[in-house]
Image (spheres, rainbow, N blue to C red):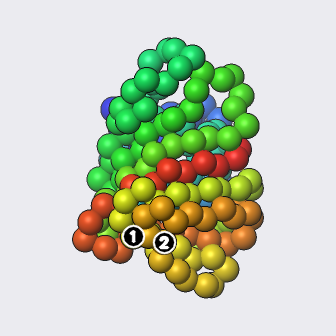
Amino acid sequence: MTDSIGGEFRRIRKEKKMTLKELSERSGLSMSFLSQVERGISTVTFTSVRKIAEALGVSVNFFFEPEEESPIKRKSLKKSADQPNFTYTSLTGNLDQPQFTPARIELKAGESQTAPYSHRGQEFVYVLEGELKVMLEGHEETLYPHESLHIDSSKEHTWYNETDKPVILLVVSTN
């Protein structure tokens, strides 16, 4: 993998012969932000990574180091990607084309995403620790440990951590 997640975004974008303008239009993120991320000047939220992955036509897991090659996950909490705003750990097994993507996500203190968005598929979010703010079609609620959310991802939504403590989630999304 490239040294940074932004470098990996750039590599895939260029492989697909896509301009920053096209990536911006497909992801809904500004060209200047995408350029800064690619150059390692700006950090990304997990929501931004999902938008970029969808715009590039790849799974979010594509940007994170693969776990050991085994049909059984033994080290499910091995950190795959530690970003300034979040930590993403893929819990996907050794399947060629999984129908859903399980992950453990830690949103660090103050990690936030202000603009709701929609994408194809479904999301299941289970709060393991902390308080998660969720906005779904303009309605906002807080989820606490052992509470969950299962939504049609085509409805505008966002979830974020506005507290001073990390939030740890189990997230399962369909592709």
Residue drawn 57% across the image and 42% down it: 102
Q: Is mark 1 on a helix, strand or loop?
A: loop
Look at the numbered discs 2 and 1 and tell me whether their residues touch, using CB distance below 8 Å. Answer: yes
Relative height, residue 105 to residue 111 (above, below): above
Q: Can residue 3 be seen in this view?
A: yes
Which amino acid, by three-letter code, is at mark 1?
Glu
> Is residue 61 shown above or below 119?
above
Disc 2 element: strand
**What is the x, y in percent for residue 156?**
67, 72
- Circle 1 residues within 10 Å: few <14, some 14–19, many ≥20: many
Relative to 125, is 65 above or below? above
Res. 165 image quadrant = bottom left
Residue 107, labelled with which disc?
none
Q: Nearer the viewer, residue 175 or 25?
A: 175
Label drawn at residue 131 = 1
Q: Which mark is residue 143?
A: 2
